[in-house]
Image: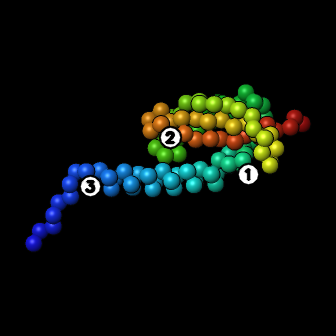
Amino acid sequence: MAKKTKRARTVRREADREQEKLAATARRLHALEPGGAPEHPLSVPTPSVVEIDATSRPCGACGGETKLGDHEVEEHETGRLRVVRVICKLCRAEWRWFYRIAAPN
């Protein structure tokens, strides 16, 4: 007896669940890389570089181009950090990058 074909809705829901798993994995990886969490921020020489660097990084979920959302200064256990929120232009995923302004020599 032949296998019953899956309904279109079932196939779509399975694909959506798989995409959600991939996005969750991408978020976990993002938190581990430099700048992905307050515990290990990226170091930049001046504040003017922060937004340029953040928007030049591709989306962690789809690899698409990102645009600037917010740029704030926050206090963390590791000190005062610049936090930039970027939004993917393709998949609309939001990412946060953490930066520390390096002390002048």
Relative to 15, is 74 above or below?
A: above
Residue sitting at x 10%, y 72%: 1
Relative to 48, is 61 above or below?
A: below
| Marks 2,1: beta carbons within 8 A | no
Residue 100: x percent and y percent? 77, 40
Q: How would you rate the neighbour count of disc 3 (Cα within 10 Å): few for under 14, some for 14-19, many for 20 or more?
A: few
Query: Disc 3 and disc 1: Cα gap in Å?
Result: 41 Å
Residue sitting at x 77%, y 45%: 76
Q: Which residue is under mark 3?
A: 10
Q: Which residue is under mark 1?
A: 39
Q: Nearer the viewer, residue 1 or 61?
A: 1
Residue 65: x percent and y percent? 50, 34
Q: How would you rate the neighbour count of disc 2 (Cα within 10 Å): few for under 14, some for 14-19, many for 20 or more?
A: some
Q: Amino acid at mark 1?
A: Glu
Q: Which residue is under mark 2?
A: 93
Q: Earlier in the sequence, mark 3 or mark 2?
A: 3
Q: Amino acid at mark 2?
A: Ala
Q: Residue furthest bottom?
A: 1
Residue 91: x percent and y percent? 44, 38
Q: How would you rate the neighbour count of disc 1 (Cα within 10 Å): few for under 14, some for 14-19, many for 20 or more?
A: some
Identify the image quadrant of residue 10.
bottom left
Left or right, 58 with reference to 70: left
Residue sitting at x 82%, y 44%: 79
Q: Nearer the viewer, residue 44 or 4?
A: 4
Residue sitting at x 20%, y 54%: 7
Identify the image quadrant of residue 94.
top right
Query: Disc 3 and disc 2: Cα gap in Å?
Result: 24 Å
